[in-house]
Image (cartoon, rainbow, N blue to C red):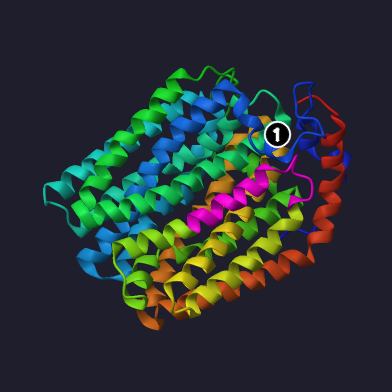
């Protein structure tokens, strides 16, 4: 339950860290198209953007191949949910420690470590599949390993973005472009996976993912940032993380956004886990059908992030969150009731669009107002609220789909999203009043970053 606390704008700690506009920033009269790509003018961000983009194509190729491999070997929606659970639950369990590490140590070095370990995981998976030695327990174990790696990678990568953007006013644009990159890969990767699985099998997809990490590792080595030095240990991990929790609970918009993300992760996001079963059992399709459905959702997400990247700042984004969650619920409900492939693709496009609007808007608002010395820990809370809750939604959805069917499970999740959006909308006026003075200071260029 959200705390009923009124926070005066002058008392919000994050007010000290709002962004500045400098002469190099896009002026108000800049074209909307130019506004979309303004963060790419920074060399470090460009390197990371394109290196990570190549790697993410491989990641999505592996994710699609893994889901299809599990369903091909077992035909079990429960195991689909179990694999997703093992891949995501470490974010919840290890989130506190990962967030403290992101604030204590050099984030670039941590990213080099997590990306290198992810490459090793992909090659091990490829070797087992291509060698015909893969079994269900090995898939679950390797999914758990990847989940542990991601538990550290997500908060570090999210909090590292600011170090690559010289002007804090471009932070929201950089976050939106990173989301666009992620979902551009989500568009391309599944299409590639569908073709490769049909022609060569799942093992080649895992091999491609392993080699794709070379791009991001090279990019990270070339990035030269003035990221704050690791501040080292200042106390017990629990105490440092508790400090961030108290900070978040004391600022109502942040805790409301995190609660909405958790509800979405529990009820909405599991539609991805059920997609192999929907493609095969409902639409009577194959791996290519599955890949195209996921690509349609990815295309919608790209459209959503392009819309967000065209915005000049985070002002007014809080209003977008309940609308996007409600639209997502409507799209998933319509998708669940559809029988035609083309109609399913259209509603998945809407689902991807609204899903990414909510996630990226939440990320932008939180990163705009958070204190720098707590950024890693707050972003671990963000990851725990989204990725950490997803495994429970995946496990629940997989179990319900086995008992109630895929369609009814999707409809239940859509109804819960509607309810969550309605509750958030009732608090919208209050949350807007808290954020409005802060964003007004941002637009006026008040305060040092």
**Magenta segment:** 297-317
- Give the residue drawn at x 43%, y 20%: 221
Q: Residue at x 25, y 70 (%)?
A: 75
What x and y, as percent, mark residue 155? 53, 39
Residue pictured at 49% horizontal, 46% vertical: 184
Q: Quadrant of the N terminus?
A: bottom right
Residue at 38% in and 72% down = 278
Left or right of 80? Residue 306 is: right
- Please identify the quarter of the rendering in which residue 405 is found: bottom left
Can residue 303 be found in the magenta stretch? yes
Residue 300 visible in image = yes
Q: Position of residue 316 (x, y in %)?
A: 79, 50
Task: Tell me the residue that label 1 is attached to.
Answer: 371
Of residues 338 and 440, the one drawn nearer to the viewer in this rendering: 338
For residue 370, say whether it is visible: no
**Measured from the top left, where is residue 286 in percent x and y?**
29, 67
- Is 31 on the left-hand or right-hand side of 111? right
Q: Is residue 145 above or below residue 66?
A: above
Q: Quadrant of residue 170?
A: top right
Within the magenta stretch, is there residue 192? no
**Does residue 365 lie above or below 5 as drawn?**
above
- Establish if 212 lies above or below 330: above
């Amino acid at each position: 339950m959200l705390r009923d606390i009124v926070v005066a704008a002058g008392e919000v700690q994050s007010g000290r860290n709002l962004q500045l506009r400098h002469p190099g920033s896009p002026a108000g009269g800049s074209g909307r198209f130019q506004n979309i790509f303004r963060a790419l003018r920074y060399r470090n961000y460009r390197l990371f953007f394109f290196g990570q983009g190549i790697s993410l194509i491989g990641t999505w190729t592996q994710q699609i191949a893994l889901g299809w491999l599990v369903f091909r070997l077992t035909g079990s929606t429960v195991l689909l949910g179990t694999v997703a659970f093992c891949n995501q639950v470490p974010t919840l369990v290890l989130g506190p420690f990962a967030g403290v590490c992101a604030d204590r140590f050099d984030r670039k070095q941590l990213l080099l470590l997590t990306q290198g370990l992810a490459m090793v995981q992909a090659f091990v998976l490829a070797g087992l599949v291509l060698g015909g030695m893969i079994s269900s327990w090995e898939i679950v174990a390797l999914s758990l390993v990847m989940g542990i790696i991601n538990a550290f990678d997500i908060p570090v990568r999210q909090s590292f973005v600011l170090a690559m953007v010289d002007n804090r006013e471009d932070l929201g644009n950089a976050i939106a472009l990173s989301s666009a990159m992620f979902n551009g890969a989500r568009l391309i990767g599944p299409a590639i996976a569908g073709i490769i699985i049909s022609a060569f099998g799942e093992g080649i997809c895992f091999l491609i993912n392993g080699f794709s990490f070379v791009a991001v590792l090279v990019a990270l080595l070339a990035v030269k940032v003035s990221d704050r030095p690791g501040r080292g240990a200042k106390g017990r991990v629990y105490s440092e993380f508790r400090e961030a929790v108290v900070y978040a609970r004391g600022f109502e918009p942040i805790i409301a956004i995190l609660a909405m993300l958790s509800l979405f992760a529990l009820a909405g996001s599991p539609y991805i886990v059920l997609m192999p079963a929907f493609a095969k059992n409902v639409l009577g399709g194959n791996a290519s059908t599955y890949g195209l459905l996921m690509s349609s959702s990815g295309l919608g997400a790209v459209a959503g992030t392009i819309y967000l990247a065209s915005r000049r700042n985070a002002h007014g984004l809080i209003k977008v969150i309940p609308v996007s969650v409600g639209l997502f619920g409507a799209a998933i409900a319509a998708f669940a009731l559809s029988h035609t492939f083309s109609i399913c693709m259209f509603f998945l496009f809407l689902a991807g669009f609204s899903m990414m609007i909510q996630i990226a808007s939440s990320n932008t608002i939180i990163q705009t107002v958070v204190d720098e010395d707590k950024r890693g820990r707050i972003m671990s809370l963000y990851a725990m609220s989204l990725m950490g809750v997803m495994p429970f939604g995946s496990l629940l959805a997989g179990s319900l789909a086995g008992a109630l069917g895929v369609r009814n499970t999707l409809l239940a999740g859509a109804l819960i999203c509607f309810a969550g959006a309605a509750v958030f909308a009732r608090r919208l006026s209050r949350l807007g009043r808290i954020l409005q003075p802060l964003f007004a200071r941002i637009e006026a260029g008040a305060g040092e970053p």
